Amino acid sequence: MRCAGDALESSFIQSIKEADQLKHKANIINSMKSDEHKQLWNGLVQDRFDEFWSINKKLMENTDSEAILHIPIRIYEAGRPFRQVLVAPLDESGRRQTLDNVLRMIHADDGLSAISHGILLPLETPLLWMAENFSYLDNFIHIILTKSA
């Protein structure tokens, strides 16, 4: 499938902006220069990981001054549009939210398996850990749900 002009780049940057809106109210992406946005894209399409990561690591920060507010997560299931839920890294009592917490928000069905990056994920995996270590290049966690065997 061919894309006209810079449509693919625009779509990618828009997804990065959406993820940062969820994580940091877009504070980080909005403080970047257009050259840095371009460097993200060029590093990706030209297989220059160091160039990409030097910018992307800013978007992945979880510090006291730029704490992650919500986890950018998209959940896919056969025959349905993807779903996205607004979920904080910690619940109301300060406990870490897990993948199981998110699945219970959107699905009453037990007996589901969650897969990301081709890996079957333990449901007790903390979402904040996933955001810091398992995000895709667009800074979202992408989860595929399947019926457990």
Image (cartoon, grey):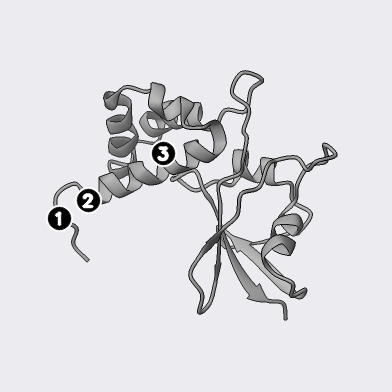
Circle number at residue 72 = none
Q: In the structure shown, which secondary structural element does the residue marked by tag 1 occupy?
A: loop
Cα–Cα span, label 1 and label 2: 6 Å
Identify the amino acid type marked 2: Ala
What is the x, y in percent for residue 28? 46, 26
Identify the mark nearer the N-term, 1 or 3.
1
Residue at left offset 62%, top offset 33%: 68
Disc 1 or disc 3, which is closer to the eye? 3
Residue at left offset 80%, top offset 41%: 92
- Say whether marks 1 and 2 touch (CB < 8 Å): yes
What is the x, y in percent for residue 56? 45, 32
Residue at left offset 53%, top offset 40%: 22
Look at mark 1 in the image and give the residue it sits on: 4
Which quadrant of the rendered structure holds the C terminus?
bottom right
Look at mark 3 in the image and give the residue it sits on: 17
Identify the amino acid type marked 1: Ala
Identify the amino acid type marked 3: Lys
Which quadrant of the rendered structure holds the N terminus?
bottom left
